[in-house]
Image: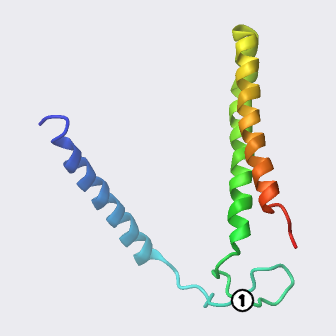
Amino acid sequence: MSGLGALPVLFGIGLLGLGIAYATARALAVAGPDRSVDQFLPGGEPVEHAFSRFHVRWYTLAMIYLAFEMEMLFMYPWTLVVSTVGVRAVVEMFVFLGILLVGVVHAWREGALRWV
């Protein structure tokens, strides 16, 4: 069997394994209490369903958070190679940080960081 011929077989085996895992979990599951509108805030009564839609502002903040996480993800390995690569690595990191700063300034100007 060639390399591409094995792909549908592996995909089918994966789907079969996934189906078996779901069926086993469903068969062994213990019915819990009704969780349609339980408390999801500590100490407060819920005013809306726990799975309700979030305000669009949260998605913008999540994107800003991910941008800063990407910054940290790239800065840790950068600290290991900056001494061997030299000035070029420093310049590349400042270009990268500049691009992230442009994104934060744009979000700030658009009002994504305002809570009112």
Q: Amino acid at mark 1?
A: Glu
- Residue drawn at x 69%, y 32% as measured from the top left: 74
Q: Nearer the viewer, residue 64 or 15?
A: 64
Figure coloring: rainbow
Q: How many marks?
A: 1
Q: Nearer the viewer, residue 104 or 30?
A: 104
* Horizontal arrangement in the rendering, residue 9 relative to residue 46 (left or right): left
For the point 42% across and 76% down, the residue is 26
Q: Locate residue 74 relative to residue 14 in the image: left or right.
A: right
Q: Residue at x 81, y 56 (%)?
A: 109
Q: Position of residue 84 (x, y in %)?
A: 71, 8
The quarter of the picture where the N terminus appears is: top left
**Rendered location of residue 82, percent (x, y):** 74, 15
* Quarter in which the C terminus is drawn: bottom right
Q: Is residue 2 above or below residue 113?
A: above
115 horizontally vs 81: left or right: right
Location of residue 98 (image quadrant): top right
* Vertical position of residue 13 compared to residue 98: above or below: below
* Residue 29 position in % (x across, y down): 48, 77
Which residue reaches farthest front?
Answer: 109
Residue 44, above or below 94: below
Mark 1 burial class by Cα count in 10 Å: few <14, some 14-19, many 20+: few
Q: Residue at position x 70%, y 23% from top?
A: 92
Q: Tell me the residue that label 1 is attached to.
A: 48
Residue 3: image location, x then y, percent: 19, 35
